[in-house]
Image (tube, coloured by chain):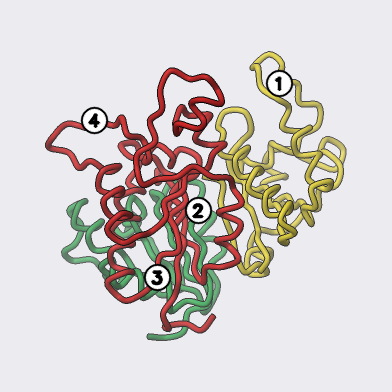
Chain colours: A yellow, B red, C green
Amino acid sequence: MSTLMVIDQPPYGTWAGREALDMAFSLAAFDQSVTLLFTGSGVNWLRMSQQPGGVEQKSLEKNLSAAPVFGVEAIYADAAACARYGLTVENMIAGVAIASSSELLPKYTHTAFAG
Amino acid sequence: MAADSLHNFTLVITGAPYSSQAPQTALSFARAALAKGHTLDRVFLYGDGVHLASALCAPPSDEPHWPAQWAAFLKDNAVPGVACIASALRRGLVNDAEQKRYELPACNLLEPFMIAGLGEWVEATMASSRVIYFHAGA
Amino acid sequence: MAPINTLHILNKAPEHPRSLACMSVLQSGDALLLTENAVLALAVNSIDPGVPVFALAPDLAARGLESGIQGASLVDYAGMVDLTTHAQKLINW
């Protein structure tokens, strides 16, 4: 049993990504193998220096930084989506590996999308 | 798990009634699965899907009442229906225990739905041979 | 029925980003089941995902598309259940 949680919705404008992150953290809390994949506009979760005070939300960047502590095995970002949104190792939060969605998806027994 | 044998399903509904088709597709699927002899371990409502467990939906009389139809299906077939507590509290869906805890003026959880944590979903991913998600389409 | 590795269940209209993503990861041995808004893909002439395609008949009928459909096998809800138990793995897009 290995789960890939896919977040393909952008941060702040929708709650689906937050709730998918809660799902990933829950799996990890129960010692279940879970990996996060950010793809499509969801890769914008991974941009450094998010300052959400003006939209009165908690920082998703901070939220996400708890992933390794909870026991999430890996965080991947889809290469094509990163290129599209101008995300590189220089402006992306630490601990994210670049991958291709189509190569990752077959590797997991259970795949769940954000909302 | 071998294909084509009898399976035990968990259905996860994340699309809300009256804003998505998810509750209808899921109910039609659930009825067909039971008719074929499969088992429904549970139905888990997550995100906007928790609105399906509201006792206060009052659609026009010529539209299907999805919360009522789901509640009747769950009762008739003794299938547990669980709304995620975090999703539910954010969206104003509470049972009497949560009403007391947060000192709210009312509770509105439709029987036989229950409120529980994401652990119910985690257990489903371990115990059920098939977990199917009914998201909102677009 | 031929074996299915991953059954991709898609309920998004053809222009939805998740629809495009789904189409781009289909592999030999997989199958695609179109439900809800995704059946509109069959009104688009160019659909050729390279894997067996199934479509939920009530969703086609609701949208006035049930007759003359090419490129997909129609299933009812019972057939959808069979597909989900026949496949080794499911992805709900």
The residue under label 4 is B58
Report if the CB atoms under discs 3 and 2 are less than 8 Å apart.
no
The residue positioned 49% from the left and 68% from the top of the image is B130
Chain letter for the residue marked with disc 3 in the picture? B
C70 to A56, vertically: above or below: below
Q: Earlier in the sequence, mark 3 or mark 4?
A: 3
Tell me the kind of residue under disc 3: Thr
Give the labeled residue for mark 2. Answer: C20
Q: Residue at x 41, y 80 (%)?
A: B6
Say which amino acid is labelled 2. Answer: Leu
Tell me the distance, in whole angstroms, between the alpha carbons under discs 2 and 4. Answer: 37 Å
Looking at the rendering, in which quadrant would you find the N terminus of chain C? bottom left
How far apart, in angstroms, are the residues tagged by discs 1 and 3? 45 Å
Q: Nearer the viewer, mark 2 or mark 1?
A: 1
Estimate the x, y position of residue A76 in percent, counting from the top left.
75, 52
Tag 1 subunit = A
Please state which of the two labelled residues, at mark 1 or mark 3, is closer to the viewer. 3
Q: Position of residue C60 (x, y in %)?
A: 24, 58
How many residues crowd around disc 1 within 10 Å: few (fewer than 14), some, or many (20 or more)?
few
Check disc 3 and report the residue beneath it. B39
Callout 1: SS? helix
Subunit under mark 2: C
Q: Are marks 1 and 3 on the same chain?
A: no
Does the residue at mark 3 contact the one at mark 4 (Cβ under 8 Å)? no
Residues at discs 2 and 1 both on one chain: no
For badge 4, the amino acid type reads Ala
Per the image, label 3 sits on a secondary structure element best described as strand
Mark number for residue A52?
1
Helix, strand or loop at mark 2: helix
